[in-house]
Structures are given as structure tokens and as C-alpha cells.
Image (tube, helix red, strand yellow):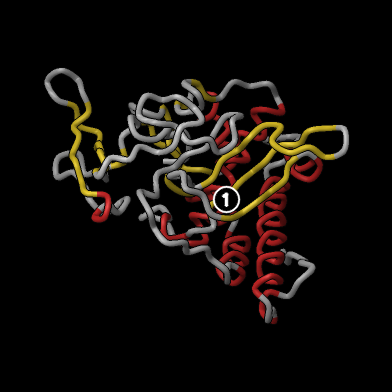
Amino acid sequence: MTLKLPVDLASTASPTDAHRAMLALLHSVIVEAARLRQEELPGLVETLQDDVVLTAGGTSRPAYGWFAEDAWRYGDRHVHELFLNADRRVAHPLASGAEDVLVTLLHEACHVWAQLGGIRDTSRDGRYHNRRFAEIALAIGLAVEKDTVIGHRTPGLSSWARADYAELLGELERGLVLAREPKLRGPVGGNTDTDDEGDEDVDAAGSPGSTVSTTKYIFASCRCRDARRHLVTIRVAKGSWRPGIICCAVCQAPFTESLTVHRQTDRE
């Protein structure tokens, strides 16, 4: 499998060319992955080619990526957006850079296919990924774990998918030469997308359109619960918070940012 790109990533001298080549690579990778799964997920290839705009950049939201329905207008019709956070410092701690990018693309492609089939794969404003989402994720080759807060998370590739997508992973390893590294002004990380609302921030009360909470602290939870079934939560100064670093000694899970600060809606 050799992906033919409009720009040779190995010879790009301009960061603009590198960005254009990166988008071409990401699009080629996700379309090829969908082609490998076309028997399990019919129609996904055509939808990704004709009805989805793939973008990559930075975001102030704690997001690996998201799928936003009808986010772009092309002539007289609307098309969807598949967004990848190009700041790879927020990558999942248990996955390589290439696998983390591929898992994010595949995760959002699951939402694309669910939208295509009229399948309601999330609830709670996109935070909760239900059984239908898990079934699609397994079919596309994602490892799936149950989570009490977000329903199902996709921390990596399944073993068979890692073999099936080996060449795509190699292309990503060689081709991801450009990464976004903005100055950190607050918490990043977590796995968020939106169901159909783009990248609106949510305040502590959960109202869309508000800015991120201005508290000096990050409140994070593991998977443990206290006697009243509340999640065990810690408080960390914003400047000291790093996603995926602090782990619970009891449940062994990393602490993740509390839902009361940001809307957590995507890949965990």
C-alpha cells in the first residue's frame, strides 16, 4: 500500500507545503483505512471523500479531535468536519504518536458512519458514547473499554487492526513532520469532540458560548468512587497539571479533568 500525495513530505522546504501535505496525508490515511473496512462499514469511504472536510490545527478545548455535523458550507450544501488536534503533546500516554493520530481519526470516522446511518451513538451532548458507538468502533479496529462517565473509550488499536493498518502507521510515522505547539494557557488533553456544535467552550455550569472557567485549579477524577458513589476528585494547580501523568494507586487509572470544567465528549 503506497499513498500518493500531492506533496513529497520528505522534500518540503516550506512549512506551508508541509501543512498542506499533512492534511493530504491524514485524508489519504483515513480514506484508506475506511476502504479496508468497507465490508463492515459500507458507505464510509464515499462519505469521507464527498461529505467531510478534514482539518487539523490547534484548539483551546481539551480535545484530541471531534466530528461536527454540517459545520461547513460548500455552495448550496453543508458538509461535515473531522478535526484533529495537531498539538501532539496531548497524545494518549499509552500510544505512539502515529497510533494516537490514527485512533483519533478512526474514532471520529465512527461518528461519521453513525451520522450516515442515522445511528444515535452518543448522548448527554456527545459526552456519553453508547453501545452502538462501541460496536462501530470494534468494527473499524479500535480497542474499546467501558467507562462509567463517558460510556466507552478508545485508548488504542486492537491487535488485529495494528497489523492491518501497519503500513498506514508507517506513513504517519514518516509524514507527521509538523506539529502545533502553542503557548499553554490552561489545561489541555482529554478526549473531546462535539456531536454537532463545533468547538464552543462550556463554562462550569455547562452553558455553551461561555469561556473556560477562570479558576486557578484543575479538578480531576480517576475511576474510584467514594461511599456516596461520587467520583474521587483531586485539585491540581493549572500550571502543574499534565494529562495522563498522575495515576490513582487504587484503580491504576490516570486522573482526567473533571466534567464540571469542560465538556468531555470524545476519545478517552
- Judged left or right of residue 209, residue 148 is left
Give the percent coordinates (x, y) of residue 71: 69, 36
Q: Quadrant of the C terminus?
A: top left
The quadrant in which residue 146 appears is top left
The residue indicated by pointer 1 is 84
Residue extending farthest to the left is 227
Q: Nearer the viewer, residue 239 or 147?
A: 239
Give the percent coordinates (x, y) of residue 242: 30, 54
Q: Is residue 77 above or below residue 101?
A: above
Give the percent coordinates (x, y) of residue 155: 42, 45
- Judged left or right of residue 51, residue 195 is left
- Is disc 1 placed on a helix, strand or loop? strand
Instruction: Identify the residue at image location x=53%, y=35%.
Output: 200
The quadrant in which residue 49 appears is top right
Q: Is residue 221 above or below residue 55?
A: above
Instruction: Identify the residue at image location x=70%, y=54%.
Output: 27
Amino acid at pointer 1: Leu
Residue extending farthest to the top is 228
Instruction: Identify the residue at image location x=19%, y=20%.
Output: 229
Q: Nearer the viewer, residue 199 or 67?
A: 199
